[in-house]
Image (cartoon, rainbow, N blue to C red):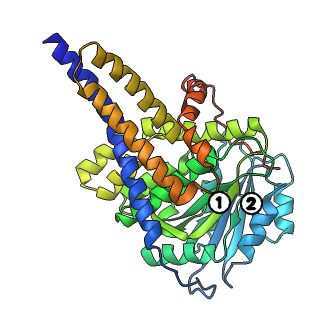
Amino acid sequence: MQKVMLSGAIAAIFCLPALLTIVWFAEIVAGCLALRRRRPTLGASRERSHRTAVLIPAHNEGAGIVPTLHDAQSQLGPADRILVVADNCSDDTAEIARAAGADVVVRHDPERRGKGYALEFGVQHLASDPPDVVVILDADCRLSDEALGHLSENAMTSGRPVQSLYLMLRHEGAPGTGVNLFAWRIKNWLRPLGLKLLGLPTQLFGTGMAFPFALLAGRDLGNSRLAEDTALGLALAAAGRPPLFVSEAMIRSTFAVSQTGIEQQRQRWEKGHLDNIAELVPGALAKSLRDRNVPLAAIAIDMAVPPLSLLVLITIVCLVLGGVAFALGAWAATLAIPAFSALLLGLGTVLAWIAVGRDVLSARSLLLLPLHPIEKALFYHKIARGKASSTWIRTDRK
């Protein structure tokens, strides 16, 4: 009896990562189908009947904000504007943004630092002459042609938050491999496309987001959360306004130049993701069940899937433990469940590579991909011990 109970407990523990892997795999398959079914879309017009404000929170971004401003200005309609929030800056961000033609407000509050505080300050400023739609951009990103039009028109028409396709590039000569680029495309491109094909909403990614102003007015945005965007997406989904993915609008940014910068960047993103899994997902799932809110449940479940490297690392650990347990006489399920997860991860990764990864990751690197999560074990150990960076700092892209 004791042996049966132990086998059942081990198998039950392995079921959670297996379920998350199934979710991940289903999104990958749907995303691949969505890419094959895509059709050309009509261009977005600048002659909009509604007013759009581009809100750019900026912390020490004087060195790189001008290209972002020029991209946005080239796509503004006659009644549109750009507002830059120079937040706790020690450089000339405000002066440079003004000289480039943007409206600027300056915020000094060293005790309340974070992008969320800057966004709240900007929304409060816009409330004196409210636009119809607010598009939020990071200060160091570039816009595809007509991106603002696609974002603004979809937000106005749907009455929902809208998330663009947000991709990362790598500086020529910068350290690292195509693994990060590939993982980013899976998370921010293929999986949201899959969710859209299934009629489900997406998470928010922090930049390239558009909102009907009424959805942000009076909302408590001020926080120092590392991934404040995903928390906002959950809150809006709970209010009946789940975010919509619009891949026709593309926003591009770059990874850091130095190895140290890349590591800090990844630590902030992944720590923010893991914090949200622990702090937000359980409550969101409970609320979705109480309210029978399927879009909220979909976002929470999607958010519960850990970063790909961590998901692979967990699966490898389960596979080893399951093999040992099976060898000692436990149920076959203790090995079969993590083996099934490993199969789905391998198949899904190959499908994703064929769909969106061949130009950034060689076939040889793909074969070596299972070693990458093992190399990152120390990285996750640092996050678990609270050693990861948790402040809003400028990424060293130049």
Q: Quadrant of residue 252?
A: bottom right
Say which mark, if any, is on residue 122: 1
Q: Are marks 1 and 2 in contact (CB under 8 Å)?
A: yes
Q: CA–CA distance between discs 1 and 2?
A: 8 Å
Q: Quadrant of residue 248?
A: bottom right
Instruction: Tell me the element at label 2.
Output: strand
Of the pair 208 and 60, the residue shown nearer to us: 208
Q: What amino acid is labelled 2 in the image? A: Val
Say which mark, if any, is on residue 105: 2
> Compared to 95, does 372 lie above or below?
above
Q: What amino acid is labelled 1 in the image? A: Gly
Q: Quadrant of residue 58?
A: bottom right
Location of residue 283 in the rendering, given as x and y in whole percent from the top left corner: 35, 41
Instruction: Tell me the element at label 1.
Output: helix
Location of residue 206 in the rendering, given as x and y in whole percent from the top left corner: 58, 54
Name the residue located 35 percent from the left edge and 33 percent from the top edge: 339
Name the residue located 35 percent from the left edge and 65 percent from the top edge: 199
